[in-house]
Amino acid sequence: MDHYGTLGLRGDATKEEIKEAFRRSALDHHPDRHAQSSEDVKKRAAVMFRQASEAYEVLVDDRKRADYDLSRLRGRGRRGWSGGGSPAATPGYGGYGYGSGGGDGYTRRPSGVGVSGFDAKYMYRIITSRGFLISLVFASLLLGGAVVSERGVDILWKMNNSGKSFEDAMKTIEKANSQKENC
């Protein structure tokens, strides 16, 4: 299914244009509006309303839209989709451009990227994901705590042992221990 085509939009539509197109489509195809229509018209309107709702849900969310746009681009290159009609209508095409694996249509890694290949957009999505950023903050806090505690130990050492290095202090302790043994 082509979400942009469902809402009658171009690929560079703004969020406001997406919202307005969905509002128009929802008004035209809402099941309540067709309550007095024939069963065939009701079913067709319900399907169109669901498609418009799904398209809106994907296109209004920045992350889902980026995934969808990326999958459309990958789908065109692999399947030779020329833009005429829906990519899901292309024979042998798995819909949404994610391949024919079934599932919910939103896989973590789009198909077509080799193991040895580097996909910068995929890495960018990982790096900017909420979980990765939370882990990065946690690791930074741990590292910062280690640095602060290390500096604190150095400061305490210098306060209690002014002018002495650690080696000098160890020599003094050894000398004191040897004098106790001799006594």
Image: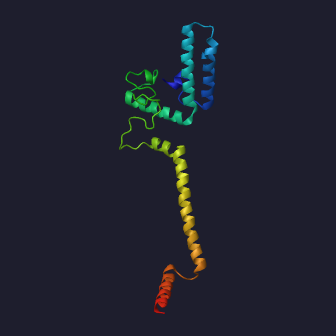
Query: 142 left or right of 100?
Result: right
Q: Position of residue 7 (x, y in %)?
A: 56, 22
Task: Give residue 38's quadrant in the image.
Answer: top right
- Please tell me which residue is depicted at 56% across the width and 71% down the height of the picture: 153
Identify the image quadrant of residue 29.
top right
Q: Position of residue 65 (x, y in %)?
A: 53, 33
Residue drawn at 58 percent across, 77 percent down: 158
Is residue 9 visible in the rendered image? The answer is no
Q: Is residue 181 visible?
A: yes
Expressed as whole percent of the image width and height from the top left, the position of residue 116 reads 35, 44
- Note whether 63 is above or below 54 in the view shown: below
Q: Quadrant of residue 44?
A: top right
169 relative to 96, above or below: below
Q: How is the image coloured?
A: rainbow
Is residue 142 placed above or below 153 in the rendered structure? above
Between 9 and 19, the one nearer to me in the picture = 19
- The residue sitting at 42% across, 25% down in the picture is 82
Percent x, y for residue 144? 56, 61
What residue appears at the point 48 percent right and 86 percent down from the top-left corner?
177
